[in-house]
Amino acid sequence: MHYWLQQLQQKRWEYSNTRGGAGQRDSWSSPTLAYAPTGLVGQDNDALVFDKLSDSMEKVRSDFAMETETDGGGMVGIQSARGPSATNPLNFSLKNFGTELRNSMSYLRPGRGGESRRSVFYTNSNSNAEEWELVDAPTKDFPEHKHHPDNLLLLLHSFKPLLRDMMASGRFGRTAETRSAESSPVECNGSKPLEMQLRLQSQQEELSRMQHEQVKLREELASQKELVRLLQQTLRTSQCDRQPAGQLAALLQERNGQVQDLCGHMERLALEKESLQQELKGLKIKVGEINDQLGMLMETIQAKDEVIIKLSQPSSEQSATPNEGSPSPNKDQEEVDILKDSLQGYKSQNKFLNKEILELTVLRRNAESREKTLEAKYTVLEAKLCQVESKYLVLLQEVKNPVCSSSEQSPGREVISRLLEDALQAESSDQQEHPIFKPNVVSEYDTFGFKTVPEEEEEEERLVAKVRALELKSLSMTDQEVSVGVKWENYLASIMNRDPVRSPELKALFRYGVPHEHRSQVWRWCVSFHVKKFRDNLAPDYYETLLNVARDKPNPASKQIELDLLRTLPNNKHYSSPSAGGIQKLRNVLMAFSWRNPDIGYCQGLNRLAAIALLYLDQEDAFWSLIAIVEVFMPRDYYTKTLLGSQVDQRVFKDLMSEKLPRLHAHFEQNKVDFSLITFNWFLVVFVDSLVSDILFKIWDAFLYEGPKIIFRFALALFKYKEEEFLKLQDSTTIFKYLRHFTHTILDSRKLMSIAFGDMNPFPMRQIQNRRSFHLEKVRLELTELEAIRQTFLRERETSQDRRSFVSDDEEDN
């Protein structure tokens, strides 16, 4: 219990320190991560803030560190478990002896083990050696009830030196200590010697059975002798008979062979008889020795039982008459030992409680200082809110008054200008010097490294971007997001650093989204799960080998890769310049992939998939994530030159639109709007650059777990989210213009996920696969027809050119 309390105190200490003095971390986030964060986002210094431990708090812990006791009584927890045990050697010896005897007797008893049972015992190969060799039971080829007597001799020979050593060491003497007599269960009830006596009786029964077999063999020998005598008499009678010489010779030869066989059999029986007699003598000697040892053991047990009975009797006469004598010195010593033990326990408990009081005092002071800081911040925010409210009241008052002339500079315009300047102005130096009193303004980059307010845009668009960032931040602080983080914390704690197992519970967690601090670990597991069948058959350094080949040999895709590196995610700080940290990693991943898939090489769109993966994974895992998407999730020819798989998915999506959103699909058909011009890029790069970053990564969480069906779900959910707005537009130009940017106006990820995983059900993957197969044949047929038309056009053009050249030659001749 003491050890457990110390560990609990240590965990609370670490958690309180990692929360930070200014309360910068959320209350539900994990104080320590099981895996080190990887990827460009995971290694970003701005991602997670860990404060240093307080010097005063560490001083408290160092001054009041618990001292570990050197004796066995002071050990707790792991030290106590790893300490030497106080096992009685006599107890241990008797237990081992009984186990060996029980195992050996189970082998010798007939009909108990069956053919498949394998019992073993140990024999001492050398009387002076201490190593034991293993003797196996007979195989199933020999019946178990016909044991050779040598096995019994080996058994008795194995127990003889063991008992001799035990008797020589004095473990069974009459002068054993009282404490060993009390602690040994074998010496208290005598169950083990009784079991030995039962085993000895079974051996005696075996011996009597063997004697009975010897009597039978003797009777059989006498009958064989009588048979020989009869045969000899028959031979003499046959000699008297005057038969033909040929028949007599054959008969004599046959009889001689029988006589020789009988003589050989008699000799073997005689040898077997002698061996049985010798074994019988040896068994009698062994039985005598075992009887002697058993008697000694019974006497020892009886004597020790008497000592135990005497010691267990209450000393009522000594307590009734105090004048007869003082308490025994053993009892006094026991009481002194108990008091010393209690004193040591109280000392340890006192040290622990003192340390606990000081730690709680430091924690309380830190909480008070944090509370004062939050109060000051709240006061500053309240003052700023009052200023903003006063400005807006002035603005409303000015807007209420009618404007006489547009050219006239009204005070309302000045107020609006000042408000816009305040909203878009950068952080001042005074605010940076006092970060505690600074409100939570929108930073230049979000958690994933994307720019929140683009600088090259107009003032109105910058203001809209800042409003969108503030709304996203407010949505991320809702109670629902906090509960999702708590669920992930509980799940990861339950699996204890093991790989997750696919289950409905885990699927529901992925559909809620993975918290930022656990996304590297979870994505790594998803990628490893999907590409396990590839990686198991390849060398561990497969990625490095591909990378070295790509560096040494020319690659036809390298030129296009270099052109697209800076165009991948220009609004992300990790890919915004040639010196950014993600550019070289992205180049390595794309080059290695092009060497693995020479049929694809490089396709525009792969760079964005790899760039998103690199934000949370290292190079090798990002390479395997690209393989999982291209070779596992997507159909064949999805990223080839023809983009056949992508075209098929657009037709499947049109079918799903007509089924799930019939009104919107009819509206698009009526206005002749081809929405596949926009959705084609959604499917090709899995919504990269089409959604706000917070929703994008939540879609990728579910995508890496469930596969390509997620793309269809969220593509339909996006149209369902804005269905009413689309239906209000009646012009094809207006619809297409709104279609190009409407996804960036969707900010509520919870509502979008509710539509994707609720309103779109049922959504079986088999339906998508069947429609893919249907449209694949149609697209291939159309491509074949287009290729035939192209070839015909090329031939006609060549023919027309030849005719023109022929006519021009004739004109020149004329």
Image (cartoon, rainbow, N blue to C red):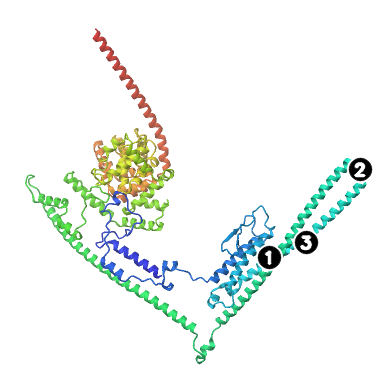
| Left or right: 100, with 375 as reference point | right
Marks 1 and 3 sit apart, C-alpha to C-alpha, by 19 Å
| Left or right: 291, with 705 as reference point | right
Residue 385: quarter of image:
bottom left
Across and down, in percent, residue 768 comes to 40, 40
- Tag 1: Cα neighbours inside 10 Å, few (<14), some, or many (≥20)? some
> Which residue does the numbered mark 3 point to in the structure image?
215
Which residue appears at 26% of the width and 9% of the height? 810
The circle on residue 243 is 2
Across and down, in percent, residue 239 comes to 91, 47
708 in relation to 268, above or below: above
Seen as rendered, the residue at the extreme top is 814
Marks 3 and 2 sit apart, C-alpha to C-alpha, by 43 Å
Which amino acid type corresponds to the residue marked 1 in the rendered image? Gln
Q: Earlier in the sequence, mark 3 or mark 2?
A: 3
Across and down, in percent, residue 496 comes to 40, 57
Which residue appears at 9% of the width and 48% of the height? 403
696 in relation to 438, above or below: above
Task: Look at the image and tell me whether residue 682 can be seen.
Answer: no
> Which residue does the numbered mark 1 point to in the structure image?
203
Which amino acid type corresponds to the residue marked 2 in the rendered image? Gln
Labels 1 & 2 near each other (Cβ < 8 A): no
Which amino acid type corresponds to the residue marked 3 in the rendered image? Val
Residue 221: quarter of image:
bottom right
Closer to the camera, 684 or 716? 684
| Left or right: 456, with 231 as reference point | left
Which residue appears at 64% of the width and 72% of the height? 294
Callout 3: helix, strand or loop? Answer: helix
681 in relation to 26, above or below: above
Marks 1 and 2 sit apart, C-alpha to C-alpha, by 59 Å
The circle on residue 128 is none
Of tags 1 and 2, the one toward the viewer is: 2
